[in-house]
Image (tube, helix red, strand yellow):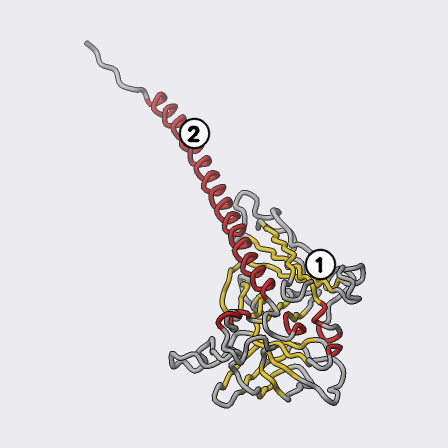
């Protein structure tokens, strides 16, 4: 019996059909992989926004604990760059039921005579770098906590006898617990020329900021990385200037058309802070790399908004009442 094999034409047709099937399968696999990558990165951005939001909300809610009310919070408001937020470091102060008797019920902070007249680095001498009797940070690396201020953290300066001078804040660059000095790179200064009878207090603070020049942009808390690809951080401030227990029109700052300036307002009348985070995916969407998302202009942000690109974005907004200041 005669046995026949495949003809050359039949083999070519079969190979052509197989190539078409393989090409279809490869395209399907590539698209599914791209979709998985996008979903994974969007989920990561969403989870990061929620985790950062919870930490921010906790710090803002606890701001003002056991320190002068004016020193609860301070910030740098930018219209062409991310904002910077300082909130008093409640973690540096023991819970009320654990405070030594001599500190119970007192307003805490490092008393000082230094009144910086310009922004930039200033070494502030305080009566004690430990404001509650128990140090929270090890500043000299010997394994023993020796200060409530620490490098990478922030500091808030207020004049408790002249609330109209507002609030000053800066980044701590050095601490000498033995000499009771804290070196602060002040980003703003107190308003009004230093009056007679000033009563200055320096308070340790957490500072939230997007690290300058970081690529990808990274949000830090007191110098510690929280998340990468945080594209913008904007803050709005709500006050009760006329003490009627309501935030009226005109008592909002850091919003469109109304900038926030820390050294022109009584910080003890602050009631709420609204924070806005914009997070983006790490890479462009391979399915649409040229036109997926665009930066968001939130609050009073006006310029330097990212143009349409291949990244997806998520916005997290939270308005938090400062429980130590609110009625």
Q: Earlier in the sequence, mark 2 or mark 1?
A: 2
Judge left or right: residue 266 versus residue 71.
right
Find residue 205 and report its horizontal and vertical position in percent: 57, 73
Find residue 150 and report its horizontal and vertical position in percent: 50, 77
Which residue is tagged 1?
A: 299
- 10 Å crowding of disc 1: few (<14), some (14-19), many (20+): many
Residue 302 is at least partly visible in this image: no
Residue 20 got which mark? 2
Residue 16 got which mark? none
- 10 Å crowding of disc 2: few (<14), some (14-19), many (20+): few
Residue extending farthest to the top is: 1
Task: Name the residue located 54 percent from the left edge and 60 percent from the top edge.
Answer: 55
Q: How many marks?
A: 2
Given this view, does label 2 or label 1 mark the residue nearer the observer?
1
In what element is the residue under mark 2?
helix
Judge left or right: residue 75 versus residue 90.
right
Q: CA distance from mark 2 to mark 1?
A: 53 Å
249 to 42, vertically: above or below? below
Residue 81 is at least partly visible in this image: yes
State the quadrant of the C terminus.
bottom right
State the quadrant of the N terminus.
top left
């Amino acid at each position: 019996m005669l046995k026949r094999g495949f003809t050359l034409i039949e083999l070519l047709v079969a190979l052509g059909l197989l190539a078409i099937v393989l090409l279809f399968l490869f395209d399907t696999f590539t698209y599914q992989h791209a979709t998985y990558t996008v979903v994974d990165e969007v989920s990561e951005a969403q989870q990061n926004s929620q985790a950062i939001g919870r930490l921010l909300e906790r710090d803002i809610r606890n701001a003002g604990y056991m320190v002068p009310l004016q020193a609860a919070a301070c910030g740098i408001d930018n219209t062409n760059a991310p904002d910077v937020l300082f909130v008093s470091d409640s973690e540096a102060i023991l819970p009320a039921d654990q405070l030594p008797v001599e500190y119970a019920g007192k307003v805490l902070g490092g008393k000082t005579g230094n009144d910086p007249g310009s922004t930039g680095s200033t070494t502030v001498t305080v009566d004690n770098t430990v404001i509650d009797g128990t140090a929270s940070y090890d500043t000299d690396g010997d394994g023993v906590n020796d200060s409530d201020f620490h490098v990478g953290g922030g500091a808030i300066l207020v004049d408790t006898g002249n609330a109209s001078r507002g609030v000053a804040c800066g980044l701590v660059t050095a601490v000498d617990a033995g000499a009771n000095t804290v070196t602060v790179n002040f980003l703003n200064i107190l308003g009004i020329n230093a009056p007679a009878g000033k009563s200055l207090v320096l308070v340790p603070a957490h500072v939230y900021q997007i690290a300058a020049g970081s690529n990808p942009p990274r949000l830090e808390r007191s110098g510690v990385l929280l998340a990468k690809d945080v594209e913008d951080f904007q803050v709005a401030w709500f006050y009760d200037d006329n003490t009627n227990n309501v935030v009226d029109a005109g008592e909002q700052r850091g919003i469109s058309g109304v900038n926030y300036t820390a050294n022109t307002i009584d910080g003890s009348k602050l009631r709420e802070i609204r924070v806005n985070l914009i997070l983006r995916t790490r890479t462009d969407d391979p399915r649409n790399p040229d036109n997926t998302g665009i930066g968001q202009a939130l609050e009073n942000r006006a310029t330097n908004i990212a143009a349409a690109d291949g990244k997806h974005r998520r916005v997290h907004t939270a308005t938090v009442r400062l429980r130590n200041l609110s009625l």
